[in-house]
Image (spheres, rainbow, N blue to C red):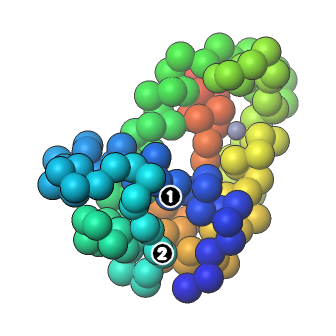
């Protein structure tokens, strides 16, 4: 499976995989390795981590859902007639989120665009685990205040 560098950095960077492994209680690798040593590849069955084994796409999808919901809870959002303006986590920038019953959720941040443009083709199994729904923490913030 060929996953672009852009998508890998947005979906399963070493930092994220380390956090997920710890959350899953899989910490044995930490005795010998640190986060920079982790080697991760997208396989059909999940993310293969050389130092820690397979992480299923279901676990990865749950991790992203929980993370987006947890961050989204604290992002100030303003309701407009045709969508929401959601404040960025790191700057004063605000992102535009909207929902259409035909095309689903949309956000104009970089992460959403990267996921939206790449996941269904580059990581179809992960896309399936997400129930074919792309989201980001801005979408989660809008979803929580709708
Ligand atoms: Zn976004």
Q: Is residue 130 left or right of residue 25?
A: right
Q: Confirm whether residue 56 shows in the render.
A: no
- x and y percent of residue 60 in the render? 39, 57
Q: Quadrant of residue 22?
A: top left
Left or right: 93, with 121 as reference point: right
Q: Is residue 105 left or right of residue 110?
A: left
Above or below: residue 137 compared with residue 134: above
Residue at coordinates 29% horizontally, 55% vertically from top-left? 33
Helix, strand or loop at disc 2? strand
Residue sticking out furthest to the front: 32
Q: Nearer the viewer, residue 57 or 22?
A: 22
In the rendered image, the vertical position of residue 31 relative to residue 56, given as above or below: above
109 over 4 or under it: above or below = above
- How far from the left and from the top, in percent, is residue 138? 65, 32
Mark 1 lies on residue: 12
Q: Quadrant of ligand 1?
A: top right
**Place of residue 123 in the rendered image (x, y in percent of width and height, measured from the top left):** 56, 74
SS for dot 1: loop
Using the image, determine if residue 28 lies above or below residue 78: below
* Mark identifier at residue 42: 2
Mark 2 near mark 1, Cβ–Cβ under 8 Å? yes
**Residue 97 coordinates in the image, percent (x, y):** 76, 35
- Mark 2, Cα crowd under 10 Å, few <14 / some 14-19 / many 20+, is many
Q: Residue at x 39, y 61 (%)?
A: 38
């Amino acid at each position: 499976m060929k996953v672009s560098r852009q998508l890998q950095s947005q979906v399963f960077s070493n930092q994220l995989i380390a956090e997920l492994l710890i959350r899953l209680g899989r910490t044995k690798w930490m005795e010998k390795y640190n986060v920079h040593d982790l080697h991760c590849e997208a396989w059909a069955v999940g993310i293969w981590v050389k130092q820690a084994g397979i992480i299923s796409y279901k676990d990865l999808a749950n991790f992203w859902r929980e993370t987006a919901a947890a961050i989204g809870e604290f992002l100030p959002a303003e309701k407009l007639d045709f969508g929401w303006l959601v404040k960025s986590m790191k700057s004063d920038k605000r992102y535009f989120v909207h929902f259409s019953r035909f095309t689903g959720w949309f956000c104009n941040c970089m992460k959403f665009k990267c996921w939206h443009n790449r996941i269904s083709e580059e990581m179809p199994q992960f896309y399936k685990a997400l129930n074919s729904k792309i989201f980001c923490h801005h979408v989660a913030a809008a979803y929580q205040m709708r």
